[in-house]
Image (tube, rainbow, N blue to C red):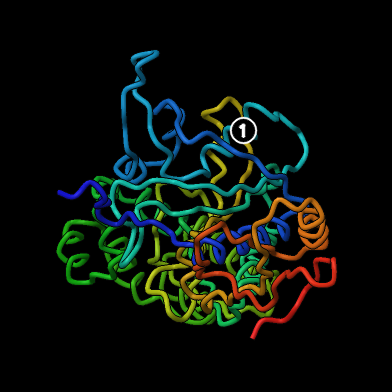
Amino acid sequence: MPNWLLPEHIADVLPSEARKIEELRRSLLDNFRLYGYELVMPPLLEYLESLLTGAGQAMDLRTFKLIDQLSGRTMGVRADMTTQVARIDAHLLNRISVTRLCYAGSVLHTRPSGLHATREPLQIGAEIYGHAGLEADAEIQKLVLASLELAGITQVRLDLCHVDVLRELLKNDERAIRYEAELFSLLEAKDIPGLRLISAEFSAVTRAALLVLPTLYGDISVIDRARAVLPGLPNILKALDELDLLVSLVGTANITIDLADLRGYQYHSGIMFAAYVPGLPNAVARGGRYDHVGEAFGRARPATGFSMDLRELARLLPGATRKQAILAPWSGDSSLQIKINDLRNAGEIVIQSLPGHENDQDEFDCDQVVVFENGNWILKKLD
């Protein structure tokens, strides 16, 4: 095997794409700050117990594990930064007030999370801690839409779900709760034949509700349809009321409801959402409420947030245009260096040619050159 061959679903990012990703990262983080979000930088490695706290079995399977040679304990390379940020809020900041935090950094997955996905996403996200009301959920979803608009994407579909619908159904049927993991997978795949087979011995009410859940997908009228066809259990009615209220708080966004889209079901504790855009088969952003995670770090805090992969998002953007630059010769003349420094201080890109070499860049288009004329270094247009 050649020593330059990379593992499957791992890739280098070359100059023009890297610049596009970095400019997008900066603009999104700057926008988060305008909303009052503070940047944190969790470590790439943590002890496994801390890293997987409250994250569920799916995250355990996605996490690379290794042995720390200093302590002998098992460590993990983060596959998601949300739990780390929850630890920072609960254990390190320890604030009583509402806290808004944001982050950006690489994560590593044992397997790709979707079609054409990388195993090394560049994750960016934002979280709100300390407010249990739907106002926080609405702010997070508006921030997702604003972030995508900054990236030049306006055709966004926001898909909403609520974990309490399924949890309330299972809670009322002891036979059904034993098959929770299988039911989650079948609902996510909208596999009605599979649901019909696995639910043969469930109560009639639970079975009928499970079989109708995959069909409860569409515009916001689905909420009223769900009220008509699902059992009138208190937590189900409350969940549908919360979805209804959140739709009104988010406003004019293109919102759909999918009561079977339960990805992250074990991790979340309330409303979940996914953002879909033309050109990507996978959700470009996912998020929702996860109130229970901070409890494992010593302080239960209401929490909601979202994350997205910058590398995947950047693939939707047009190719980066070449930046105008100035070509300068190499010389020991101090006045040339002063000229170059002045140009760079003014924000110009100046590339000095090293002796005996041509310039070959993907990112820069040199349309001016520094030349020595009449005792001065001056700028001239290049043909």
Is 215 in front, or is 308?
A: 308
Judge by depth and name the residue closer to the eye, 363 or 92.
Answer: 363
Q: Position of residue 252 (x, y in %)?
A: 67, 80
Which quadrant of the rendered structure holds the C terminus? bottom right
Give residue 187's position: percent from left, percent from top: 30, 64
Q: Is residue 141 left or right of residue 307?
A: right
> Which amino acid does the dot numbered 1 rest on?
Ile
Residue carrying label 1: 88
Q: Residue at x 82, y 62 (%)?
A: 346
Q: Is residue 110 left or right of residue 19?
A: left
The residue sitting at the bottom extreme is: 383
Residue 138 visible here: no
Q: Residue furthest front?
A: 374
Q: How many marks can you see?
A: 1
Give coordinates of residue 22: x percent, y percent. Answer: 58, 59
Q: Residue at x 73, y 69 (%)?
A: 370
Position of 75 relative to 250 (above/below): above
Instruction: Work out whether 172 lies above or below 216.
Output: above
Q: Residue 243 at x, y = what percent?
A: 58, 67
Label 1 environment density (alpha carbons within 10 Å; few <14, some 14–19, many ≥20)? some
Indicate left or right for 250 with 186 as reference. right
